[in-house]
Amino acid sequence: MVKPHMPSSDISKKQVNRASIWITLGHFSSQGIRLLSNLVLTRILAPEMFGVMALVFTIITALNMMTDLGIKQAVVQNKKGDNDLFLKAAWTMQVIHGVVVSIFLLVFGMIMLIYIQPAMVVYKNAYAHPDLPIALIIMAIVPVITGFNSIKIAQCSRKVQLGKLVLIELLAAISGIAVMLVYAQYSTDILVLIYGSIVSALVKMALSHLYLSGVSIGFAFNKELFKEIYTFGKWIVVSSVMGFLINSGDKLILGIWITSSALGFYSIAVILASFIKQLVEKFISTLFFPMLSSALRKLDDKNDIKPLYYSIRFKVDTFCCFSAGFIYGISDLLISVLYDERYQDVSAILKILSFGCIWIGFQLAGQLLLADGKSKKLSSIAFFQALSLYLFMPLAYYLFGFYGAVWAVALNPFIRFLVSSYYMKKLFFFDVYKEARGLVFYPVGALLAYFITITTSNFI
């Protein structure tokens, strides 16, 4: 039997290896710093502060996603992605986007302060917290700052030059966390988290201009290029909105049902459960998407991408399924070691959310569709996943309470697999064995975690 040919990409193996190292080091470093600061701050600040900021970031993300035009993806995917005029037009759109989001956020914060928050007090839920409107108003500056991030960030992603991007992210994170820890010595209010977030955004924006090389800064109001970017990105807007509803909408809904303290516990569990998810998603968006895009541009028959696609999928699925089992088995030990008795409820939530790691590899199908220019299909995948979440999450909460809603969140990505599988079979290929083979590594991870828990129980 003839072995299928592995399609080549403009991205060399050396670039792939270097990028993989940078992504991994950057993620573990930034998440390690984030976890360390979280451990310190949870001992200083009340749990409800984390719940309030979870809502703030969720609302900011919602506004960003609802107006997202896929500018970064356009730079990565478009053949003009190295053209100075195209890049300046893309940056102009990015700046306008940031200003628009900030205006909406400021207006929303004022409306919440005057009308919504007073009406919510009677319900005693997360939206009733008095700090929420003020936090939204102050944080309205952040989208303006991020809008001025250099377009050279997208250039680096296109060329898979990730080392400097990782360093910028790390320095920005360290700066923000340093401000939080210093300010927390003098105050324990929510401004600790707000000021740290603003400083982090400022540092990233400044370094993106000073540290990265590429196109010189400048505005370009080119109607044809605006239209070209918009045409590519208009379905990404839909996909982004659906992605927000899937990944962050759970907090908006839970905020209606539970207190800010309970939402804080849930948010901490999400941070821990998302450690693996965010790492793999960085690989998928910053490395695998450019690889697939580059390979498809060189192929006469797009189905020849199959060996490369399933080679990537096997690595991703093996890692994710193993990690899902490991997180489930280690949850009790992890929370008891990291947090004080106020936060022990996080363990049960983390166990449930760990199942979400199993489905991460299915996102690669959406990136393949996007690399082939089928952003509309990616939007429909996200639509069905979001629709199922907003149907089943309230039902699960009604029938089984808070933990039922958490299960609905954890199992929801299976809908993405079903819809993605339909499009893959229709437009590309679909191999049942290769789709499922990573599952065998789930019990391996769980057994290792249980072994560690048992062997260390006598020492803790």
Image (spheres, rainbow, N blue to C red):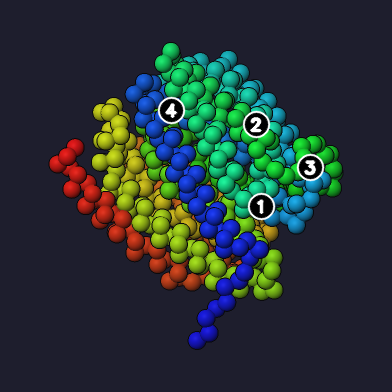
Residue behind mark 3: 89
Q: In which quarter of the image is the C terminus?
A: top left
Check contact, mark 4 vs mark 3: CB within 8 A.
Answer: no
Amino acid type assigned to the residue bearing label 4 in the image: Gly
Could you tell which of marks 2 and 4 lies nearer the N-terminus? 4
Local packing at callout 2 (Cα closer than 10 Å; few below 14, some 14-19, many 20+) is: some
In this view, 372 is above or below 227: below
Give the Cα distance between marks 4 and 3.
38 Å
Can you tell which of label 3 and label 2 is closer to the viewer? 2
Q: Is mark 4 on a helix, strand or loop?
A: helix
Marks 3, 1: nearer the viewer: 1
For this orientation, the residue located farthest to the bottom is 1
From the viewer's perspective, tell me whether residue 68 is left or right of residue 449. right
What type is the residue that disc 3 sits on? Answer: Ala
Can residue 359 be seen? yes
Q: Which label's residue is closer to the chain start, 3 or 2?
A: 3
Q: Which residue is under mark 1?
A: 158
Q: Mark 1 to mark 2: distance in Å?
A: 21 Å
Residue under label 2: 206
Question: Of callouts 4 and 1, which one flags the residue occurring earlier in the amino acid sequence?
Answer: 4
Badge 4 local density, few (<14 within 10 Å), some, or many (20+)? many
Q: What residue type is labelled 2?
A: Ala
